[in-house]
Amino acid sequence: MTDLDLDLRWYAGTRSGRRGAAPPIQVHPAAPDTVLLRQSITTNFEAPFLYLLFGGDRAFLLDTGATADATSFPLRATVDTLIDGWLRAHPRDGYELIVAHSHAHGDHVAGDGQFADRSRTRVVGHSAADVAAFFGIPDWPRGRSRVDLGGRVLDVIPTPGHHPSAVAIYDEATGMLLTGDTVYPGRLYVQDFPAFQDSLRALCDFSAAHPVSVVLGAHIEMSARPFRDFPLGSTWHPDESPLPLTVGDLHAIRDAAARIAGRPGAHRHANFIIWNGPCRLESASQSIRLLLFRASGLLRAPGR
Ligand SMILES: [Zn+2]
C-alpha cells in the first residue's frame, strides 16, 4: 500500500478575513498519483477539501468546492495543470476525467460548471438516483460498487444521513477512506438520523473487511484544543485539529451516535460534534461566538 504524506499545515486564513498570502487553492501531493486540494478559507469559510486521484486511464476528482467563479476559485485551471503534469510524466492518449461528489451540498458542487465544456469528462449528477446510476450501485443505499481508473480501483459506498446522495470513497492503492461531510473533525450535521447510523455501521463494517490507512473528510472545524470548534462562519482557523481520522474514530462516532439517537441537540466530543436535528440554541450560540471571535481578533490585531 502506498504511504500518504499528510504532515503539513493548511493555511489558517487571517484574522481580518482578508486574502493575505494564501493561494485560492492549496495543493498538496500526498503520494504519487494522489493530490489533496483545499479551497482557501479566505474565499469561503467552509474551506472544503477536494481529492484528485490518477489511474492509468482516467483521473477522479471528488468535489468541486464552494465557489462557482473561476477567477476567484480557479479549480478547472488547477486540475488541468495537475493532469497536464501527470500526462507529461505518463504520456498516453484519450485520458479521461470523472468529476464526482461526496454529496451535493453547495460547498461541494459549486465548481461543477467549470468542467461543463471539458472534453473526455463526465460530471456525476447530484441526486441519489444519479449517483446510483452513474456508478451502477444496486439497491441504494445498501449496495456498493467499484470504479476502475485503470490499475486503480475505488469502492463507492452510499452514506446517506448528512445528505441523501452522500457516498464514501475507498482507495485500495493508499487505503484512504474519503468520507465527505459524514465523518470529519468538525460539526457532523445530521439530517436523517437512522440513515446516518446505518451509514456509520456500514463504514465500520467496511473498515473491518478492508485495510483502511486513514479516514479523510471534507472539512476541519475543530481546533487543536479538544472539544473546541471554530465558530461557524469563521474565516480564520488558527491551530486546527489535524484532518486525518482513524478507524477508531469511526467506531467512536458510530457509538456516540447510538447513545444520542432520539436526543436532539449538539453533542460535543473531543474531535467531533454531532448535530442531531436543527439545534437552534447551538446555532444562536455559534453566531454570538463568531462575533466574539472576530472581535477578539480585531482587538489583538488592530488595523489588520
Ligand atoms: Zn454537507
Image (cartoon, rainbow, N blue to C red):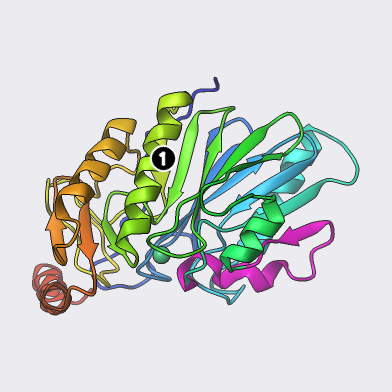
Q: Is residue 124 magenta?
A: yes
Q: Is residue 108 magenta?
A: yes
Coordinates of residue 289 in the picture (x, y in percent): 11, 72
Coordinates of residue 246 in the picture (x, y in percent): 32, 33
Q: Which residues are magenta?
A: 106-125
Coordinates of residue 23 in the picture (x, y in percent): 48, 60
Report the image quarter containing ligand 1: bottom left
- In the displayed structure, would residue 91 be above or below residue 137? above
In the displayed image of the protein, which residue is found farthest to the right? 93
Image quadrant holding the C terminus, namely: bottom left
Residue nearer the viewer, 149 or 11: 149
- In the displayed structure, would residue 137 be above or below residue 31? below
Q: Residues within 10 Å of mark 1 (few under 14, many from 20)?
A: many
Residue 260 occupies quadrant: bottom left
Residue drawn at point x = 27 percent, y = 43 percent: 254
Coordinates of residue 6 in the picture (x, y in percent): 41, 35
Image quadrant holding the N terminus, namely: top right
| 243 horizontally vs 39: left or right | left
Residue drawn at point x = 56 percent, y = 42 percent: 35
Is residue 183 visible in the rendered structure shown here? no
In the displayed image of the protein, which residue is found farthest to the top? 1
The residue beneath circle 1 is 203
Residue nearer the viewer, 135 or 269: 135
In the displayed image of the protein, which residue is found farthest to the front? 139
| 158 horizontally vs 138: left or right | left
Indicate if the residue with disc 1 has its beta carbon within 8 Å of ligand 1: no
| 233 horizontally vs 284: left or right | right
Kind of residue at badge 1: Leu
Secondary structure under tag 1 reads: helix
| 174 horizontally vs 91: left or right | left
Residue drawn at point x = 42 percent, y = 41 percent: 202
